[in-house]
Image (cartoon, helix red, strand yellow):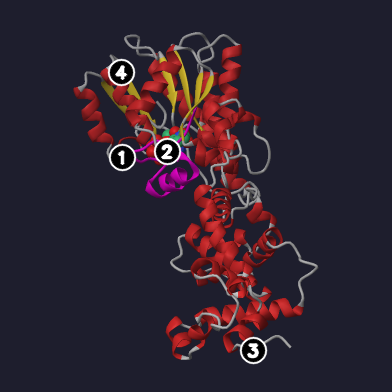
């Protein structure tokens, strides 16, 4: 086992020792100096296996050849299975990684797989297992070289099968319990919809895959509601479309809009009574508050209105989350690419303005002025209105001399009627003056 003293390698070694492996040869560049290696050796020995810890760089074909030759001299336990779990990751886009970094990531995993393939080129093995990654299946942000090296593993497995040899390449989602996916990477993956897998379950899946002679497969625990919309943001994704849970997550939501409608109704009412300037401010506040919540900022003012969402750290999962929040708040059905189509909060605010309030040709400067006065009135506390006598004047019954059919109706009807009045009618009513 290459990488046999790493996190995933150790789990597989435990399973092998528990299931009758006679001799386990665990390799890594550090050999028995790897932290925890000696304790692992004791544990595996107690399970009944003979254990050899070897320092061997799998990227060095000569060192690997020497090790395989040495093992071949042991007639009592010839090599019957190869597990290639050595690898290094690199979080960097292809255009950012320099050739040396690219080579480093390729060498252990991809070149190592090719060397092992060449060294075990006859039908002598029960299993030839390669540890690949979902990064090579669905792609991962800033995982250019790493994705390429994992795809190479799939190609090696396909070629071996085509030659009639054992080969299984498993592209893993994240495993729980440490290793390449540490706590920070684990929470990023979870946010993307990739739930960490319990090692025991993952090893069981591996055993099944080998027993069924699978060549290339992906084993991941995916929360499709999270993963699929972000993954399909850039366009159709035939890769996942025939997975029922993914297809369901990509279907437009049913018209179950009660809750969004309540929030959207309140927003619409506030917008209706506001001037253009206030509408702009209200919608920008909304965008900034929701963006802050997605980014985990405590307050909306942490979101610069002019800064591009990408620069603020928005990725596709966050873009979908912001879109969902804005759909709920506005009642609109906005597309998932919204955040990248309208790059800054101000641009997004303008888009919401256009969607929610199509330009009104009839709207005049007077209307704006009225909206301004109405919203100013709304900011005056009720007690002040009452003190000033304005409230009493508004709600006072009509003159007793007014004929009943001309009197304003009581209670709710009256409030509705007052709501519908324009400013000049309100002022006339409050001051009891007749229209000139
Ligand atoms: N952890 C996950 O959730 C996850 C998910 C998808 C795929 N994978 C894949 O699964 C494999 C194991 O991952 P892990 O989480 O167990 O990583 P890990 O704990 O870092 O173990 C990797 C091991 O590979 C060894 N290694 C690295 N370069 C080597 C080289 N040139 N020659 C020999 N050994 C080398 C390291 O030992 P030395 O440093 O001593 O050489 C280390 O013990 C990797 O290929 C990884 O890409 C892991």
Q: CA distance from mark 4 to mark 1?
A: 20 Å
Between disc 3 and disc 1, the foreground one is 3
Could you tell which of marks 3 and 2 lies nearer the N-terminus? 2
Q: Left or right: where does residue 76 sit relative to residue 400? A: left
Tell me whether the residue at label 1 lies in contact with that at label 2, contact meaning CB atoms closer than 8 angstroms.
Answer: no
Q: Left or right: where does residue 24 sit relative to residue 267? A: left
Local crowd at mark 4 within 10 Å, few (<14), some, or many (≥20)? some
The front one of 384 and 139 is: 384
- Element on which disc 1 rests: helix
Report whether residue 260 is seen.
yes
Residue 185 in picture, x, y percent from top left = 43, 47
Instruction: Say which residue label 3 marks.
Output: 433
Is the CB of mark 1 within 8 Å of ligand 1? yes
Could you tell which of marks 4 and 3 lies nearer the N-terminus? 4
Is the CB of mark 2 within 8 Å of ligand 1? no
Instruction: Say which residue label 4 marks.
Output: 23
Quadrant where the image shows the N terminus: top left
| Bounds of the magenta segment | 171-194
Q: CA distance from mark 4 to mark 3?
A: 104 Å
Could you tell which of marks 1 and 2 lies nearer the N-terminus? 1
The front one of 105 and 258 is: 258
* Residue at 62% in and 50% down: 98
- Quarter of the rendered image showing ligand 1: top left
Q: Where 428 falls versus 361 (above or below)? A: below
Local crowd at mark 2 within 10 Å, few (<14), some, or many (≥20)? many
Local crowd at mark 1 within 10 Å, few (<14), some, or many (≥20)? some
Q: Which mark is residue 195?
A: 2
């Amino acid at each position: 086992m290459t990488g046999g003293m790493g996190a995933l390698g150790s789990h597989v070694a435990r399973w092998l020792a528990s299931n009758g492996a006679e001799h386990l040869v665990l390799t890594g560049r550090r050999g028995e100096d790897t932290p925890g290696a000696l304790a692992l050796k004791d544990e595996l020995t107690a399970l009944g296996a003979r254990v050899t810890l070897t320092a061997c760089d799998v990227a060095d074909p000569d060192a690997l050849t020497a090790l395989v030759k040495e093992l071949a001299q042991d007639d009592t336990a010839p090599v019957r299975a190869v597990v290639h779990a050595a690898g290094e990751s690199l979080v960097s886009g292809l255009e950012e990684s320099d050739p040396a970094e690219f080579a480093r990531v390729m060498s252990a995993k991809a070149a190592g797989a090719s060397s092992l393939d060449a060294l075990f080129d006859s039908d002598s093995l029960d299993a030839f297992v390669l540890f690949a990654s979902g990064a090579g299946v669905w792609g991962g942000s800033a995982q250019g070289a790493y994705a390429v090296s994992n795809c190479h593993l799939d190609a090696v497995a396909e070629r071996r099968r085509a030659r009639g040899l054992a080969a299984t390449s498993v592209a893993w989602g994240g495993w729980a319990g440490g290793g390449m996916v540490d706590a920070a990477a684990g929470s990023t993956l979870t946010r993307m919809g990739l739930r960490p897998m319990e090692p025991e379950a993952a090893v069981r899946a591996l055993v099944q895959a080998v027993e069924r002679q699978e060549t290339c497969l992906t084993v991941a625990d995916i929360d499709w509601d999270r993963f699929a919309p972000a993954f399909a943001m850039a366009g159709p994704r035939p890769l996942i479309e025939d997975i029922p849970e993914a297809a369901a997550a990509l279907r437009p939501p049913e018209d179950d809009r009660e809750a969004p409608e309540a929030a959207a109704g309140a927003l619409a009412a506030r917008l209706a009574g506001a001037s253009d300037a206030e509408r702009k401010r209200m919608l920008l506040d909304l965008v900034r508050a929701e963006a802050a919540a997605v980014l985990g900022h405590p307050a909306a003012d942490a979101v610069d209105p002019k800064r591009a969402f990408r620069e603020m750290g928005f990725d596709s999962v966050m873009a979908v989350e912001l879109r969902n929040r804005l759909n709920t708040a506005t009642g609109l059905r906005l597309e998932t690419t919204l955040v990248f189509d309208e790059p800054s909060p101000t641009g997004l605010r303008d888009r919401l303005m256009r969607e929610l309030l199509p330009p009104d040709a009839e709207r005049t400067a007077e209307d704006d002025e009225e909206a301004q006065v109405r919203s100013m009135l709304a900011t005056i506390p009720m007690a002040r209105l009452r003190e000033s006598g304005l409230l009493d004047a508004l709600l006072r019954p009509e003159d007793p001399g007014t004929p009943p059919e001309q009197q304003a109706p009581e209670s709710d009807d009256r409030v509705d009627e007052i709501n519908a009045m324009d400013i000049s009618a309100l002022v006339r009513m409050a001051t009891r003056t007749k229209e000139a």
